Image (spheres, grey):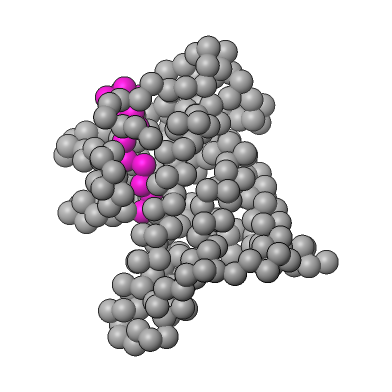
Amino acid sequence: MPILSVLWETVKPTLVVWTFGFSVMTAVELLAPRERQSLRGRLPGLLFWAIWLAISGVAYAGFRTLWTALGIAPVITLPTGAGWQTPVSWVVAPLIGAAIYDFFFYWCHRAQHRWLWRYHAVHHSIREMSAVNAFHHPIEPFVQILLIAIPTSLIASEAAPAVPAMLVLMHLQASLIHTPTRWHLGPLSSVIVDNRFHRIHHSLEQRHFDHNFGAFTTLWDRLFGTVWMPARDEWPKTGIAEVDQPRTLHDWVALPVAYDRARGGGTRPATPPVKI
């Protein structure tokens, strides 16, 4: 069946890349830890990710099958491939694509904080944050399809030689930004998101709420007034005061209900001047 073929083609590279990313970044956490976390404490995260990736694979396979059946084609094509013949362009082209993707991710992320916080709170509830313990609620793939996959599907780019390598690097970065390691991107972190920058986004301190939404570049946070550049030793505790991080499948799925009961509503206070 076509849907099964699309599903496998969607899931296979994702499993390989994410397994590689988790393995590399967990090794980094163990080699240069900024805080100690047990390997056993990462096991629930592995389980949640396995289920989440399966749900995400089914959701994206269904989306791609539907889009193909409807004949929906991109309306914009970026000249980032065959016409760019220098090694510099091979790097610049996928970087532009990554920044465009991150623009939609940025606004999806802000929408989650504004209107879907009780579900996104699962991701923010994590107190023992690491590459593996950076899971999301199982509803989030559908939110990402609506707010990221659909608009980016209308923008195409010509194939560039460095794109596959860039995708692997972006997955590594997605794991890096949650790692509790002393290693970071140094001066490059003024442009590219690293673990210190993203740590602010997960902070327990209210003054940090609703800052640093970008996952790839700091550009959109700077442009839209949500940036908080961390001080050299600024490393806040993470989590949500009202609830503990999920440690069982029931906790993981039902945390939005537990959060509502603990807080009396699904809204997190924002810190001015952040507005949507």
Lateral position of residue 126 relative to residue 12, left or right: left
Residue 39 falls left or right of residue 55: left
**Residue at 42% in and 73% down:** 78
Q: Residue at x 37, y 29 (%)?
A: 238
Image position of 230 with respect to 268: above or below:
below
Residue 225, quarter of picture:
top left
Q: Picture coordinates of residue 192 (x, y %)? A: 28, 54
Relative placement, left or right, of 14 versus 96 is right
Q: Quadrant of residue 34?
A: top left
Most extreme residue toward the right, as rendered? 1
Q: Quadrant of the N terminus?
A: bottom right
Name the magenta segment's main secondary structure: loop
Which residues fall within the magenta stretch? 204-216
Q: Position of residue 33 (x, y in %)?
A: 32, 41
**266 versus 41 height, above or below:** above
The C terminus: image quadrant: top left
Observer able to see residue 39: no
Q: Residue placed at 60% from the left, 58% from the top?
A: 15
